[in-house]
């Protein structure tokens, strides 16, 4: 049975339990809700939670465990001699799953009997012909052992799905019946429901924490694997980036880190002044009508996809800088450069700085403005000497958040700055030239994990070390920004 139908049946059982428990509670009170310990709806919600929580929890657990069991059990059935050179057990298992799916389709469309799909009275040639009738083609390299594994995979999956349906529906019914029996005028339904809701809220809040831990642990394990094959000192202090899958690689992070910080610095030099001045104008000078129009127009920049910014850098900004600045000065010949990516990224970051700074400036108490003006200060003097210093902690937090956004950007850098790492070993002039192509940490992560590469090689595993390093940097910036903003809020609320 499809998963959607299982969910509909569980919801139907919970709905019946709701009305049954509510009716029973009212009946024990003689129809007078004032005698009940809790409102009637709490008795119904107790039945709903009793039916949904255990059944859906088992359903989620079953959907996680069953594929893992199938993978390990069926993979063990495939002999080593079946795995051809250049292939792997995982590739064979993908064929097994594809054939099993084809067998299900063939049975549903009547092209094959259930006995044939289960391996009874079936041969490879016959199965190939039957599957071809439903549009599933088996290659000539598919061996009988793979077909047997697919038939076993289908059989176990079908049995597992049937038992899952029985167990989930049984738990839903038992939970609803148990809640119905407990529905009595003296039963503290409200307390039970509120505790259950509190538990659900705690579980929802824990998802973010567990997700963060899962991300960190997944990167940490692969990073440890990388450092077991490559020296940590060469990674963190190396000034050359030259991955070579033939074994002679230089995987120093400093060139990538320099490119990341250099592009981010140029982006902030564009975004911070423009965004801050825009925020001051919008909050202190613009009238209500102009603000109502201009603020949404500025914030539209935040909704533009980064691929569009990348195309703008590739087709417009890069050629302009090359033709009117780089070539005449002799500083570069390519449209891909640090300056191109930095300028476009700065435009992208303007609404981040502007919107956050605008909200922070508006949070400064009006009494501070009135006091400054009352002492004879002009409006511009009030902004420079009172409002901006008072809002400075929040503005710094906004800048740090924009910095984290800039450091994590990928698409604009790929299309605007090129794929060449900074040449730190060729002198200072090459490293600080803003018209030279430079790549960043995020770009190299994508590059090292794509293509036909050996996942166990250090040249691939280095992507996890790069990711973990970038994660630590951005996490530190976010924590610092939140700390500064919190101090600011504590000061003025």
Image (cartoon, helix red, strand yellow):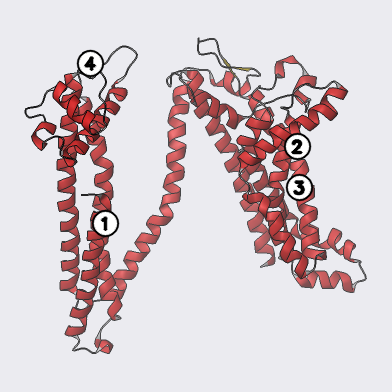
Sequence-first disc among 2 and 3: 2
* Real-space Cα separation, disc 3 to disc 1, in angstroms: 50 Å
Of the pair 172 and 480, the residue shown nearer to us: 172
Q: Which residue is mark 1?
A: 7
Q: Position of residue 110 (x, y in %)?
A: 15, 39
* Real-space Cα separation, disc 1 to disc 2, in angstroms: 52 Å
**x 66%, y 23%: residue:** 255
Question: Which tag is nearer the camera, tag 3 or tag 4?
Answer: 4
* Real-space Cα separation, disc 3 to disc 4, in angstroms: 61 Å
Rendered position, 194 above or below 104: below
Sequence-first disc among 4 and 2: 4
Q: Quadrant of residue 466?
A: top right
Mark 2 packing: few (<14 Cα in 10 Å), some, or many (20+)?
Answer: many
Name, please, the residue furthest toward the front.
133
Of the pair 272 and 119, the residue shown nearer to us: 119
Question: Which tag is nearer the camera, tag 1 or tag 2?
Answer: 1
Mark 4 packing: few (<14 Cα in 10 Å), some, or many (20+)?
Answer: some
Question: Which tag is nearer the camera, tag 3 or tag 1?
Answer: 1
Q: Position of residue 441 (x, y in %)?
A: 60, 30
- The numbered dot on residue 272 is 3
Q: Which residue is mark 2?
A: 266
Q: Position of residue 295 (x, y in %)?
A: 72, 60
Q: Secondary structure at mark 3?
A: helix
Question: Which tag is nearer the camera, tag 4 or tag 2?
Answer: 4
* Real-space Cα separation, disc 4 to disc 2, in angstroms: 56 Å
Q: Which residue is mark 4?
A: 82
């Amino acid at each position: 049975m499809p998963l959607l139908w299982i969910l509909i049946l569980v919801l139907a059982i919970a709905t019946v339990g709701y009305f049954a428990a509510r009716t029973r509670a009212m009946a024990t009170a003689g129809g007078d809700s004032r005698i009940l310990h809790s409102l009637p709806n709490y008795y119904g919600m107790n039945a709903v939670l009793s039916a949904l929580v255990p059944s859906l929890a088992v359903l989620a657990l079953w959907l996680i465990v069953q594929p893992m069991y199938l993978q390990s059990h069926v993979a063990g059935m495939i002999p080593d001699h079946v795995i051809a050179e250049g292939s792997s057990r995982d590739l064979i298992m993908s064929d097994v799953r594809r054939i099993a799916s084809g067998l299900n389709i063939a049975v549903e469309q009547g092209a094959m009997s259930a006995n044939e799909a289960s391996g009874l009275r079936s041969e490879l040639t016959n199965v190939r012909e039957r599957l071809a009738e439903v549009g599933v083609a088996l290659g000539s390299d598919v061996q009988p052992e793979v077909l047997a594994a697919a038939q076993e995979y289908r059989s176990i999956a079908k049995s597992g799905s049937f038992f899952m349906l029985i167990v989930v529906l049984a738990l839903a019914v038992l939970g609803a019946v148990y809640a119905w029996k407990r529905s009595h005028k003296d039963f503290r339904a409200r307390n039970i429901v509120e505790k259950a809701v509190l538990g659900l809220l705690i579980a929802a809040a824990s998802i973010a924490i567990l997700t963060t831990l899962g991300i960190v642990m997944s990167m940490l394990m692969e990073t440890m694997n990388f450092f077991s094959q490559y020296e940590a000192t060469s990674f963190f202090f190396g000034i050359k980036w030259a991955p070579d899958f033939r074994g002679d690689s230089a995987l120093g992070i400093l060139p990538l880190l320099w490119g990341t910080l250099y592009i981010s610095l140029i982006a902030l030099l564009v975004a911070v002044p423009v965004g801050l001045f825009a925020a001051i104008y919008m909050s202190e000078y613009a009238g209500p009508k102009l603000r109502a129009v201009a603020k949404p127009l500025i914030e539209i920049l935040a909704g533009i996809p980064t691929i569009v910014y990348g195309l703008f850098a590739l087709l417009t900004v890069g050629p302009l800088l090359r033709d009117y600045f780089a070539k005449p000065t002799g500083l570069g010949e390519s449209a891909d450069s640090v300056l191109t990516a930095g300028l476009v990224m700065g435009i992208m970051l303007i609404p981040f700085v502007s919107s956050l700074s605008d909200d922070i400036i508006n949070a400064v108490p009006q009494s501070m403005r009135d006091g400054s003006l009352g002492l004879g200060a002009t409006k511009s003097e009030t902004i420079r000497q009172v409002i901006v210093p008072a809002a400075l902690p929040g503005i710094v937090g906004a800048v740090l958040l924009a910095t984290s956004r800039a450091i994590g950007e990928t698409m604009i850098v790929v299309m605007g700055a090129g794929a060449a790492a900074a040449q730190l070993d060729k002198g200072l002039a090459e490293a600080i030239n803003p018209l030279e192509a430079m790549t960043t940490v995020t770009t190299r992560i994508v590059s090292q994990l794509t293509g036909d590469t050996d996942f166990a090689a250090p040249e691939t595993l280095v992507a996890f070390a790069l990711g973990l390093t970038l994660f630590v940097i951005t996490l530190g910036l976010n924590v610092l920004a939140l700390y500064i903003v919190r101090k600011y809020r504590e000061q003025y609320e």
